[in-house]
Image: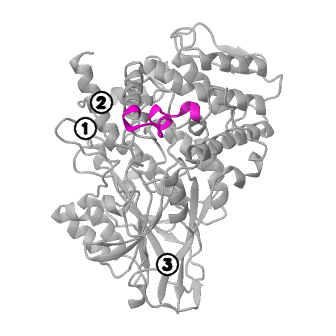
Amino acid sequence: MERGSLRQFAVLTWILLIAGCTSTAPVLNSKAPDGPSDSTTAPATAPIGVISDTQIHESRGTASRYASKAGDEFVEVTIRTGQQVIGSTDILMQALKGVTSLPIVLHLGDALDVSCQTEWDAFVRTMRVAGGNTPWVLVDGNHDGFYVGNISPTNSTKYNVGYWNQVCNQGRYSLESTLSARHFDKAMLVAANVQHVLALQSNADSSLNEVPRNGTCQNLVDGPIACAAWHIDTEHPWMSYLTQLVRLPAAVPSEPPVYVLALDSSTYLNQPNVDYQYALLTGVKAGFTPAQLRDARIMVRQLPVDARFFIATHHHVNEWRASALSTDERSELGGLLASYSFLNFVLTAHTHEGGWYDHKVLGNPLLELNTGSLADPPLYYRDLQFVRSGGKEWRVRSNKHLLNVASIPECASYKPPTSDSGYTVDDQRSENDRLHDAPKLTRKVGQVFSALRHFFGFWNAKHEELRPQLLTYRDIVRASLPEDAGFYYERWEGDEAPRNYQSREELEARLEYLAWCSHKSKCSVTEKGNLLKKLEDELAPDSKLYPQEVLMKAHYARLCAAVSAAEAVGNEDKVVEQVIRNSFSGEYILPGSWQR
């Protein structure tokens, strides 16, 4: 092994040990604040929907040493099961069915995973199809605009934009020498999210430059977003942000208005990057720039006298690291938290776990509700509502809604892959996980050698990663398409001819062959990626190729496979059991609310 390769692997190991948005859970006091109480309560707001961490994953790009199965030996969520990857949008659709009867859906970030254009397109498409007319608000997370949720590559960094583009380039496809799919950095993400904000407003035809910035708000008061301020920096994408002030629908007109201040906790003055001397990783540290915090303070100063607000961010409160902020940041954040209108309540995500926690930040008491994910077990979403007791004391009420096979009637007859199929959850486990009961030395040796195999044989690792997706899609095709259904698609640039499958059986046979073949020309990653992309598009719920009945069968086949796999991943996991206990439904008195 060459010295340079050893150095690369050492760096990889270090990155994977500390990176990843679910690797650090908050160590917090689970006792909620207490205070005077009144037995008579009345709703102050209508309930809203809360979802988070969908992490739609682009897996069909160029193989990578650094975002591959090698990482599974160190960070459990580097590569999820193939069933979860192809069913991520179906899980999101199922969650949206539970909240679209509510007036607003709040997404707390990490809609994406690698942060590719294809991931954003799939997310927006799903929100449009399943969300109907329900307005949704995205609070950007660290996976939204940063490569695998940790760094912000540029042309001058070692892991540069070209590298990021290739990982995002589904099917390694090019059209006239231009990549068909590219990276989606923070500036691009904020610009796209701003366009969504504008589309929610009554003046949806306004251009970017016509809407006031820095919290002046005049042109946005007529829609669901009461106010929005943003900064888009294409030269320094990590400094871009979008801050939104959203009014929650009142339960009755006489109640004081309640707003959510959606703060982007992944905006940084310094470039998130990794090198031998210094690392700022967005997956383990929140970021607020003084400019964004100033915008937020201007926004809340404009609220009506009787209004109240709470804060929503992606990162949990411990990752704010308030004591380590600069003087300007501490001053701005402290002023925000000390505001008379603040309900001393923060809604967060990021941990993929969840619970109710109390804090004291810059001298201010806070109640935090940290919610779970739609990517890792236990899958769940929440509703959220504010109530008042005795006409003065404020409380927050939230119910957890688990997503599992038992909660989905259409999954009652689903049968997971058999033990000899080659694509069960156990077949996809890392060596580290498989050896969890072995002696520590045996486990460590197995872990390192497995990581080395995948790290240096990264093309073979990519074939292994795609195998369960291809076999699961074979099952989906079998469950949904009529026997005589044809399937045609154009292949990549330079290939000999388009593919035209005359029947379901022919398509099934090709998927089976591709799953088990790893020859670079007979069954390339390129062909596999293109076929998987075409299947995703043509069997999507809004596709025009097949009748709706066929598309719904495909949707539920993907959904049941994904939810079943997630359950199997978390089966008998003590962390999952603890999360279910901590993230209970409940109602809490907000700290200090009885004093106002």
Marks 1/3: CA–CA distance: 41 Å
Instruction: Report if residue 432 lies within the magenta region.
Output: yes
Q: Which residue is mark 2?
A: 159
Given this view, does label 1 or label 2 mark the residue nearer the observer? 1
Whether residues under marks 1 and 2 lie with C-beta atoms below 8 angstroms apart, the answer is: yes
Residue where numbered disc 3 is placed? 588
Q: Crowding near pointer 1: few (<14 within 10 Å), some, many (20+)?
A: some
On screen, 114 above or below 338?
A: above
Q: Residue at x 58, y 40 (%)?
A: 84
Q: Say which of 65 and 491 sits in front.
A: 65
Give the label, 3 or 2, closer to the camera: 3
Q: Could you tell me how far apart the alpha carbons at marks 3 and 2 are, in whole angstroms? A: 46 Å
Lower sequence index among marks 3 and 2:
2
In the picture shown, does residue 444 fall above or below 556?
A: above
Q: Is residue 198 above or below residue 541?
A: below
Mark 3 Cα shell of 10 Å, populated few (<14), some (14-19), many (≥20) = some
| Residue 172, placed above or below residue 214 | above
Q: 566 left or right of 441?
A: right
Residue type at numbered disc 2? Tyr
Location of the C terminus (image quadrant): bottom left
State the residue position of label 1: 274
Q: Residue at x 32, y 44 (%)?
A: 18
Across and down, in percent, residue 218 comes to 40, 68
Q: Give the quadrant of residue 327.
A: bottom left
Magenta region, residue range: 426-442
Secondary element at image label 2: loop
